Image: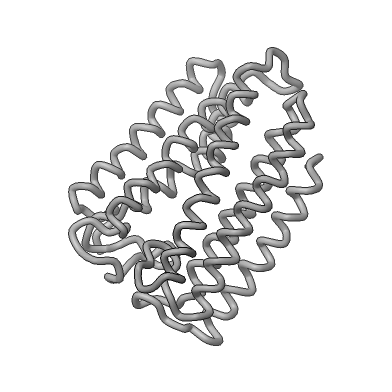
Amino acid sequence: MKNETLFYYGLICLVAGVFCLILSKINPNPILGISGWIKPFKFCISTAIMAWTMGYYMQFLSNQNQVSIYNWSLIILLSTEIILIIFQASRGKISHFNQEDATGVMIFSTMALAVTIFMLHTAYIAILFFTQEKFAASEILIFAIQLSLIITVVFAFEGFAMGSLMKHTVGAEDGNAGLPIVNWNKSYGDLRVAHFFGMHALQLIPIASVLIAKNKRDVIIIALVYFAFVTFTLVQAFMAKPFIKL
């Protein structure tokens, strides 16, 4: 990958994620019925994937000055979220939707602000992909990146739905039994499902497009099917139905 800054940052996040996973076995420090270290593990791995994905995609942008700015925007803003999540995990406290005390409120508000700014900056990168006329990559790949960026940004802001409820579970309080690792609720609706799949449109739509699309129409179909699927998981969650009931 040409973007060394995000490549090495992704490696740092990967190592941090592995460290959190080890801590989940050594010192579970349970929060809402699951090891408190699982959440920072997931966010570290997700951030590593985000960094590597955007680092790879942005090599096709001609405005590398904006790419450099985005690199540090991603590093500073997402590191802020990860550090605060790790800090709360070490205290045995929830990080998101924490209203227990002034510290919890401040931490949650800071994370929400950092992620909002980051996704707005990502939306700007999407604009650069749409306004640039020529790319040193296939038309199918670039079009898939453009559409995946739109879906990713849209469902990133679905996080505001969780923020308005101050929880991610619909039909019950947070903390019920969940699926392994992802911890999505097995009995009630969980807004994290649509958030997860929406965010990872950034990887899945371009991969599917490169593998099976023969033209831009095929890319549109792939993106529409994926968007419909993620929207279905969102509606399902708001109806208090679990993604998978076990």
Q: In this view, does 55 lie above or below 85?
A: above
Q: Residue, x 38% and y 30% (percent of image)?
A: 225
Q: Where is residue 220 in the image (x, y as percent from the top left)?
A: 46, 21
User: How many marks are shown on the rendered structure?
Assistant: 0
- Does residue 137 appear to the left or right of 193 in the view shown? right
Return the residue nearer the eye: 151 or 75: 75
Q: Residue, x 48% and y 83% (percent of image)?
A: 28
Q: Is residue 142 above or below residue 165?
A: above
- Does residue 15 appear to the left or right of 165 in the view shown? right
Q: In this view, does 85 lie above or below 162?
A: below
Q: Residue furthest top?
A: 133
Return the residue nearer the eye: 67 or 54: 67
Q: Where is residue 67 in the image (x, y as percent from the top left)?
A: 73, 35
Q: Where is residue 40 in the image (x, y as percent from the top left)?
A: 53, 67
- Does residue 169 appear to the left or right of 60 in the view shown? left
Q: Residue, x 61% and y 52% (percent of image)?
A: 77
Q: Where is residue 243 in the image (x, y as percent from the top left)?
A: 29, 53
Quadrant of image for the C terminus: bottom left
Quadrant of image for the N terminus: top right
